[in-house]
Image (cartoon, coloured by chain):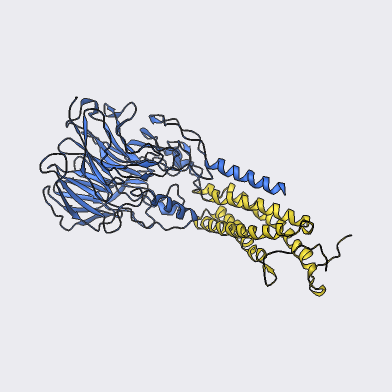
Chain colours: A blue, B yellow
Amino acid sequence: MKRPATLLATAAALLVLAACSRSAEPPTQFGFNPKLPAPKQFLLPPMGVANPVGWDNGAPKAPPGFVVQAFAKGLNSPRNVLALPNGDLIVASSGGPNMEPNLRPKSFIFQWLMNTSHGGEKGATAGENTLLLLRDANHDGVADQTVTLAQNLHSPFGLAWANGTLYVGMTDALWRFPYAPGQTALGPGSVVTELPGGPIDHHWTKSITLSPDGAKLYAGVGSNSNIVENGLEAEHDRAMIWEVDPATGAKRPFATGLRNPNGLTFYPGTATLYAVVNERDELGNNLVTDYLTSVRDGAFYGWPWSWYGSHVDIRVHPQRPDMVARAVIPDYSLSTHVAPLGLAFLKGGTFPAHYQGGAFIGEHGSWDRNVLNGYQVAFVPFVNGRPSGTPEPFLSGFATGKGTDVHGRPVGLAFGADGALYVADDAGNTVWRVSWRGNP
Amino acid sequence: MDRHVFRPRIAVGGVPIHAMLVPFPIVCFTGALLTDLAYARSAEVQWTNFSQWLLLVGTVFAGLAAVFGLVDWFGAPRENRPAIGLWHMVLNLVLFVIAVFNNLVHARDGWTSVVPTGLTLSVIMVLIMIVSGHLGHRLAYRHVARDLPHDDRPDYQEPRP
């Protein structure tokens, strides 16, 4: 009876080997021209799903000279922040729409794994999808008033305000509400235009921004899958940035092939739109790198057929060499699976000169990786209006360093009227305030 | 009654539990090959979803069948275990391991969850089942059935001396 036993043992050993694909090196895949290894396909893809343990009285760490304060604690999955000119903050507290059907055995396993990561995919339950107004009347860096502006919204995420109008990117529509800073209640709103929501709604966050002249709105719509495993027809109107006329609701695709674009922001003083993009999973610990890029009108960025220009994804059928030939290489790699969801540029304010003109990026953090990556607010220096050098950790300490335990996960961020950086932390249920105190 | 006869240990009303379970993997794995072929021809996602469920259910029942089969086999005195049963077991254990791998391959996203590796494994699985199923039936009809009353023996031949 030796043969079957040996066979079984060999098979078991093979399975174990497949499971423990080599632990990932710390990423050195920043900036222009990132080193992109050959894609791998796995029996069990590398995974490290965050286990949120909360902050207790801890806080993330910023470089010397900065003060980090919990501006508001005990929130329910704050995802995004909007700073108003009067110093108030509007916070979108939201959870995913949970309308993705479990059509495969894998869906059930992934759902279970992700649900262990509270604040990752679960977040606020339906009915708690709120907009909050946070006000710090006594200017001590801690909000002393919290007002619920609206509730029972449909997974709100994107926030923009101009000229008496608050725009909110719900998962299925872009809304407008009349709103003057200082108001503590939100009147009835109306739909500017519908956006692709259900069915499925895999990447549900609709990041929005206004053009500097206020004439156009831009909305990021993520793909309905990792790599079209729900069929190409499910991707209709998705994985692109829409340009929307706020007056009429008319819209057109502004840039396409962006798997999950978020953090839509115009570079200060220019008409250049930037976004951070979450690239595809299950090709390896160090593939594919997420990126920060200026978004060119009419450009196609590759998804699903390729990444970083000409790197063809063989998981898509039929292949489209014509589309691969069109694919634009994005500007600046942030390394793999960091899940950038927030972007804010610094112009003026109180931070030191080193940070002027640079980008602050909320990296929600990896799951498709043996070793956690992201879980920080990264700073990307800019020179002459272009990213330059390597990213620096600006706000770190979200990961505990113990396995996959994390205190929180940064998402959207914004500079307030007071010059401080405000960061939504969904798994930590906190909005952090980072201000410059001066060199000690 | 022949003393050297392979008798399944676990049976209900004379029907071995193992025999009741084996149709599930046979049907499921064969179905998975068909739905894999349908996906490879159409790239229609629903076909690979069918394949994944068929593979999962087939693998679970194959595992259960293996448990009862192993108990039947090792529960029988050594001299009552025909070589044909050993080959049936070895092939089906190989089949089970390939099935587990094929579940994982099918859990990938997109086209390469099926083409080429998943489909290839599904073909190999069905080929193994044709041989191992045949051996299993020979075991049942020629080594179990010969213990039945003479008239009920479907394919009985006297054992060679």
Tell me if residue B96 comes above or below residue A440 in the rendering.
below
User: In percent of the image, x 43 and y 42: which residue is there?
Assistant: A48
Q: Residue B69: percent from the left, percent from the top?
A: 67, 59
Image quarter where the C terminus of chain A lies is top left
Question: Which residue is outermost to the bottom?
Answer: B151
Q: Which of A128/A194 is in front?
A: A128
Q: Residue B47: percent from the left, percent from the top?
A: 53, 57
**Residue A155 in sight here:** yes
Q: Residue A363: percent from the left, percent from the top?
A: 33, 39
Image-based side of A348 in relation to A324, left or right? left
Image-based side of B52 in relation to B82, left or right? left
Quadrant of the image occupied by residue A300: top left
Q: Residue B27: percent from the left, percent from the top?
A: 62, 62
User: In percent of the image, x 56 and y 50: which residue is there?
Assistant: B114
Number of marks in the image?
0
**Residue A247 in sight here:** no
